[in-house]
Amino acid sequence: MLLLSPSSASLLSLQSHSYYVNSSRSRRLHQSLKIVGMAKETTDRGNGIVEKVAIAGGLVSTPVIAWSLYTLKTTGCGLPPGPGGSIGALEGVSYLAVVGIIGWSLYTKAKTGSGLPSGPFGLLGAVEGLSYLSLLAILVVFGLQFLEKGSIPGPLPSDQCFG
């Protein structure tokens, strides 16, 4: 992306008058633009650890939520607690991770006008999209569950499901 300060000439003006600019001024302008462009590149790489944690969390969470929603739709109950409650805990943390990614995305959208950066190999953008799709699936399945049963299951295992 090419950024120009308000006091500098427009890009169109620079292109049309390139023959009239002496070479030393042209080199300085080119170097200035190159520095501004490099500054933009480095700010896009910020949050490296946070991005990697969000990617890992999202790539694990979305399949767990899909499994949870499928189980809820077919059995009327969420995932079983599993050994020591590990599967139920993973299910709960997965829902929280997706809500966190969506919250981060909405915050970034409100602050910058665009969503999350694409991240390494485009994975953060993919996780962002998968999180929104998971939210849509959650709303649909929970809505259907509410219409059929009159309620949605709570966060703790019930005796009806795993008694």
Image: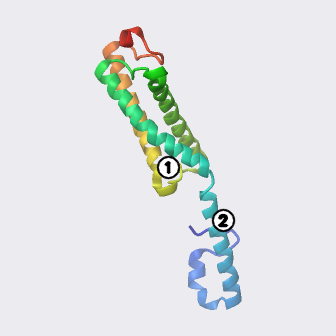
- The mark found on residue 105 in the picture is none
- In this view, 32 is above or below 93: below
Picture residue at 40% right of the left edge, 20% below the top:
80
C-alpha distance separating marks 1 and 2: 21 Å
Q: Is residue 124 visible?
A: yes
Task: Say which quadrant the N terminus sits in.
Answer: bottom right
Picture residue at 45% right of the left edge, 42% below the top:
59
Q: Amino acid at mark 1?
A: Leu
- In this view, 43 is above or below 112: below
| Residue at the farthest front position | 83
Task: Say which quadrant the C terminus sits in.
Answer: top left
Specify which label sits upstream in the sequence, 1 or 2. 2
Report x, y in % for residue 159. Answer: 40, 8
Report x, y in % for residue 76. Answer: 33, 18
What coloring was used for the rendering? rainbow
Q: Amino acid at mark 2?
A: Ala
Residue on which disc 1 sits: 124
Of the pair 163 and 113, the residue shown nearer to us = 163
Report x, y in % for residue 132. Answer: 44, 39
Of the pair 49 and 76, the residue shown nearer to us = 49
- Dot 1 alpha-carbon crowd within 10 angstroms: few under 14, some 14 to 19, many 20 or more: many
Is 26 positioned to the left or the right of 91 in the image? right
Question: Is the Cβ of the residue at disc 1 closer than 8 Å to that at disc 2?
Answer: no
- In this view, 28 is above or below 112: below
Q: Circle 1 — which element?
A: helix
Q: Circle 2 — which element?
A: helix
Is 131 positioned to the left or the right of 146 in the image? right
Q: Is residue 109 visible?
A: no
Residue on which disc 2 sits: 39
